Amino acid sequence: MPEMPEVQGLVEFLRGRLTDRTVTRATVANIAALKTYDPPITALVGATVTGVERHGKFLDVATAGTAEGGLAPHLVFHLAKAGWLRWYDALPSTVIRPGKTPIALRVGFDDGSGFDLTEAGTKKSLAVSVVRDPDEVPGIARLGPDPLDPGFDRDAFASLLAGRRTQIKGVLRDQSIIAGVGNAYSDEILHAAKMSPYALAAGLDDAEIDRLYRAMTDTLAEALAAASGKPPADLKDAKRRGMRVHGRRGESCPVCGDEVRSVFFADNSLEYCPTCQTGGKILADRRLSRLLK
């Protein structure tokens, strides 16, 4: 799943190519991906792009509307678990056949360039919205603070954790609490902080909060730097290369050499190092229907 660093990489890539470009085509190939109807998707055609921004894991293409002075729609999309953006300097002329392609949306511009939003697998969660204001998208309206916002300091972070008798892994992933962090980077943050994914947020002392805040900001800043300047085709590999524990089950922890372990859930897993994070304890696997302690 693309998370904040990869989405920001896409934002920077698109911002440099789409600003001042005019939309010439917006074709929906998977109608289930389109979550809005007013404005219609056709409102984008003829609109001039004014900028590209990120809201958590949402990407927002803003426009000034059409030359005739119509509304200024935003194209907002969330790539979900298996979605991605495929960029073309020259957009293909092939006809998209709904139901026969992973393409959910194709957008073209007046210089011949464009992109497809694609989604692999059978579980379709990619979401596309055309709105007058990004806050009309429910997922954006309920976002918590961005963890790298200059105003989000250690004390602001501590206030979000206070009183939450929730496992810290879940807190980091909850978009209404902290925006932009998903399954992969929460694993990486907790490994860097030397903290169990099942530690309760409310039970962390001041030293642990300090350590977790530094781990979060440092991990995300490093990932943003790694994603900066890369085209969409290279962002996934850059993310994988930067992972120390996530997706590395069975490999050696780069810090202590212990074996990286996994806990599996219904549709995802988490990875951790027992020596670095749980005092050597192996966490129970939910596939075996055992309690997690």
Image (cartoon, rainbow, N blue to C red):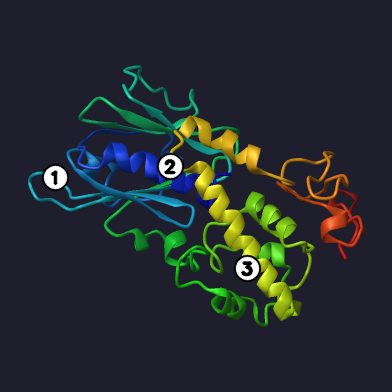
Above or below — where is 246 with respect to 191?
Answer: above
* x then y, percent, for residue 70: 13, 50
Q: Which residue of the protein is positioned furthest toward the front in this rendering?
A: 255
Count residues near mark 1 (Cα–Cα under 10 Å), then give few for <14, some for 14-19, many for 20+. Answer: some
Residue lying at 31% horizontally and 18% vertically, measured from the top left: 93
Q: Give the mark, 1 or 3, whose residue is nearer the N terminus.
A: 1
* x then y, percent, for residue 229: 43, 39
Q: Give the mark, 2 or 1, whose residue is nearer the N terminus.
A: 2
183 left or right of 93?
Answer: right
**Cβ–Cβ under 8 Å for marks 1 and 3:** no
Kind of residue at badge 3: Tyr
Residue lying at 45% horizontally and 73% vertically, measured from the top left: 151
Kind of residue at badge 2: Leu
Q: Quadrant of the N terminus?
A: top right
Which quadrant of the view contains residue 92? Answer: top left
* Residue marked by disc 2: 10
Above or below — where is 184 with respect to 136?
Answer: above
Which quadrant of the view contains residue 103? Answer: top left
Label 2: state its secondary structure: helix
168 left or right of 290?
Answer: left
Is residue 165 in view? no
**Cβ–Cβ under 8 Å for marks 2 and 1:** no
Disc ID at residue 66: 1
Is residue 217 in view? yes
Label 3: state its secondary structure: helix
